[in-house]
Image (cartoon, rainbow, N blue to C red):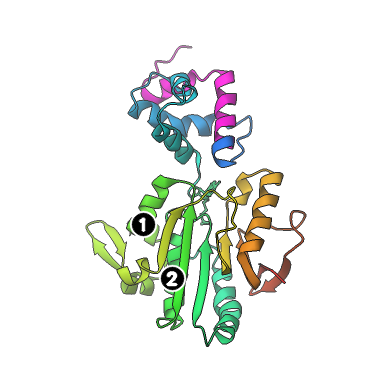
Amino acid sequence: MSTTLTGPERASIRLDPENYQFLQEFVYRESGIVLDRDKHYLMEARLSPIVAQQRLGSLNELCRALKAAGPSGLRQQVVDSMTTNETMFFREPVQYDALRKVVLPRLMEQRRDRRRLNFWSAAASSGQEAYSLAMMLREMGLEDWYIQINATDLSTQILERARQGRFLQIEVNRGLPVQYLVKYFRRDGMDWIIRDEIRNMVRFERFDLRQGMGAMGPFDVVFCRNVLIYFDVCTKKRILGEIRSTLFRGGHLLLGGSETTLGLDDGYELVPACGTVLYRVP
Ligand SMILES: C[S@@+](CC[C@H](N)C(=O)[O-])C[C@H]1O[C@@H](n2cnc3c(N)ncnc32)[C@H](O)[C@@H]1O
């Protein structure tokens, strides 16, 4: 049976096996993300829009352009497209409960003189994680504290979105309590924009988690959620060790629900709280 394919579909169907392997290696080198051998569909779906936008004939041509060390903008565009940016406001709410009920009251007591707290959202995506934290801190009456929330990601494209603090209706419908929407967002056409009082609490920067973290921190709490799952064991171990060195003694790491330090880094204590597990530096 012969089917006429057009546009991205035609571009994607011609990806040669050696170019699939080239892209696997390219994505691993540039991001640490491991793509299995059966991720053809994902690669094609994510990269075909770049092929169309750059007016290249096929994914193989895209590979040729990358191999020719093409413009760094193209390399970044390909890496950005291969990241999975799925996120939502107050994702894994039990972790925010544990922060609000257990971790923060203790920190507020310990720091009542300095009145300063440092946080890091280490794979921040479009910003919902960092903004959720900022809104929660504001609700806890910490307005007159010096709060620093660093939010970083590998993808420059997603960081640009995060900085804008502009969200679609469908995004504010996911996880955000309606009273927070009313209080901390304003409507702009079909979108919702986060108010400056919250946006200004967060500083967004590009950071590759595989970089050395000597210049980061010290932090009271690090969120590194739903990103380790994309890395191999060796990369996970290195990142967990580096993050540990950015935390204050007694500082906490929050991982995604399917992630753990177990078997990777025994320098963390597991702390059960509010139906979840936090990872603390003793
Ligand atoms: C699934 S999102 C997680 C967002 C948020 N932490 C959450 O749990 O909702 C994963 C994020 O990790 C980022 N990422 C992937 N590789 C990275 C790397 N090497 N360094 C920093 N960020 C990376 C992606 O760009 C993406 O935005």
Mark 1 and mark 2 lie on one chain; the one further toward the N terminus is 2
Which residue is nearer to you in this view: 228 or 206? 206
User: Crowding near pointer 2: few (<14 within 10 Å), some, many (20+)?
Assistant: many
Residue 253 falls left or right of residue 191? right
Q: Position of residue 235 (x, y in %)?
A: 66, 46
- Find residue 213 and report its image quarter: bottom right
* Vertical placement of residue 81 versus 2, above or below: below
Q: Position of residue 253 (x, y in %)?
A: 62, 65
User: Crowding near pointer 1: few (<14 within 10 Å), some, many (20+)?
Assistant: some
Residue 129 falls left or right of residue 57? right
Q: Is residue 251 magenta?
A: no
Asked if residue 129 can be seen in this view, the reply is: no
Which residue is nearer to you in this view: 206 or 9? 206
> What amino acid does circle 2 point to?
Ala
Q: Secondary structure at mark 1?
A: helix
Q: Secondary structure at mark 2?
A: helix
State the residue at coordinates (36%, 51%): 160
Q: Main secondary structure of the magenta part?
A: helix
Per the rendering, the mark at residue 163 is: 1
Q: Which residue is mark 2?
A: 134
State the residue at coordinates (44%, 37%): 76
Asked if residue 115 can be seen in this view, the reply is: yes
- Find residue 62 and report its image quarter: top left
Magenta residues? Answer: 1-28
Which quarter of the rendering shows the C terminus? Answer: bottom right
